[in-house]
Image (cartoon, grey):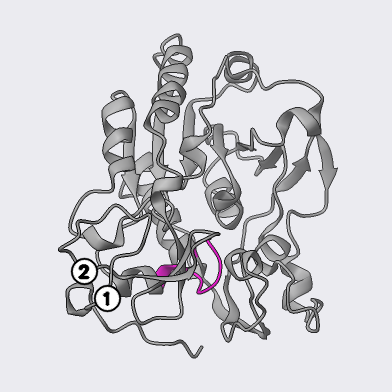
Amino acid sequence: MKRTLCVLAALMLLLPSVPGMAVPEDENTVYKVVSERKKLYSLADTNYLIEDYQIYFLPDKSIIQAESFNRVLSAFPNVETYVYLATSSRSMDFDRLDAVPPLYELIRENYPNSKTDLLPIHSIEDYCRYYYKTDHHWNYLGSYTGYQQIIRMMLGADEPLMKPVETVTFSVNFNGSLNKLISRDNSDEPFTVYRFDFPEMTVRINGKRKNSYGKQDAYFDGKYSKRDKLVNHYGEFYGGDQGIVQFTTGDETKENILVFAGSFSNAVDMLIASHFNNSYFVDLRHYKDDMGEKFNLTNSIKDWNISKVLLLGDGYFFKWGTTYR
């Protein structure tokens, strides 16, 4: 697939400081204003749209979420817990790529009993490799890298990983969420994915049995919108946001996992689920509306025989100030 190359590093640029960004007056910045009202920027000399991470960095709410989570899990000393940060522009200061993202520092400090990891972004080139040009989500390379790190973190180096069967590029350009934010449909980035040979598994969405999660088979059969420039291909292909999605492989020799996530997990749900017997992916933004009640973490761990709990998200996920019970 053809991509605009990301070739300039931050220190090579002589750009003026962006209003609203926390950069010293004597320091250059790679943030170039696209829409000050929407707090939307382009990254250096690339065509990649990014956001201001400070909008999403709310330490007080992040700490409330961590304290609540730790309090509930303290009653389950045999349940292993993990936190994975998808380092999108919502958690990164691109003017300080040599520093640990402030949100990740907060995560490491406030989840002392959990294993933690993050998607490695050390350069502008890394970001362009792992993310869409006009969307806040990770692309097929970013999500696959995240999946590998998550499984290594949870199951160790000896766990066999799912391998892509092939790379498929669909004949449509993807105008993502950030383009839509400013009413643009000028993306030149094709929608590209990996195809996997997933093990057989049953799917339940909000408690109801479904044939599949997402429309991967339809896309591979050429059945997707080619005329509507604003279709959310990420959500259509991988599966949209739901209160709860359950995958069951039927392999009772494997563990059961509970994952709290937002839309970043959509691209890795089935990959992660292939390593477990029952996998429950919960999006607390939608759970109450979809299921008619608040989610009860304590009861779910007991009822579902959960042995692992994973928190997976970007800066948006960790600013919710979620309280668990």
Q: Residue at x 46, y 25 (%)?
A: 65
Q: Which residue is outermost to the bottom?
A: 2
Q: Is residue 149 magenta?
A: no
Q: Examine the rendered structure and indicate whether residue 229 appears above or below residue 98.
A: below
In the image, which disc is placed on residue 28?
2
In the picture provided, is 65 more to the left or to the right than 246? left
Q: Is residue 242 above or below residue 80?
A: below
* Closer to the camera in the image, 222 or 137: 137
Q: Measured along the vertical axis of the image, is residue 147 above or below residue 170?
A: above
Q: Indicate the quadrant where residue 11 lies.
A: bottom left
Q: Main secondary structure of the magenta part?
A: loop
Q: Amino acid at mark 2?
A: Asn
Question: Where does label 1 land, which residue?
Answer: 15
Horizontal relation, residue 138 to residue 202: left or right: left
Q: Which residues are magenta?
A: 129-138
Relative to 256, say whether 134 is above or below.
below
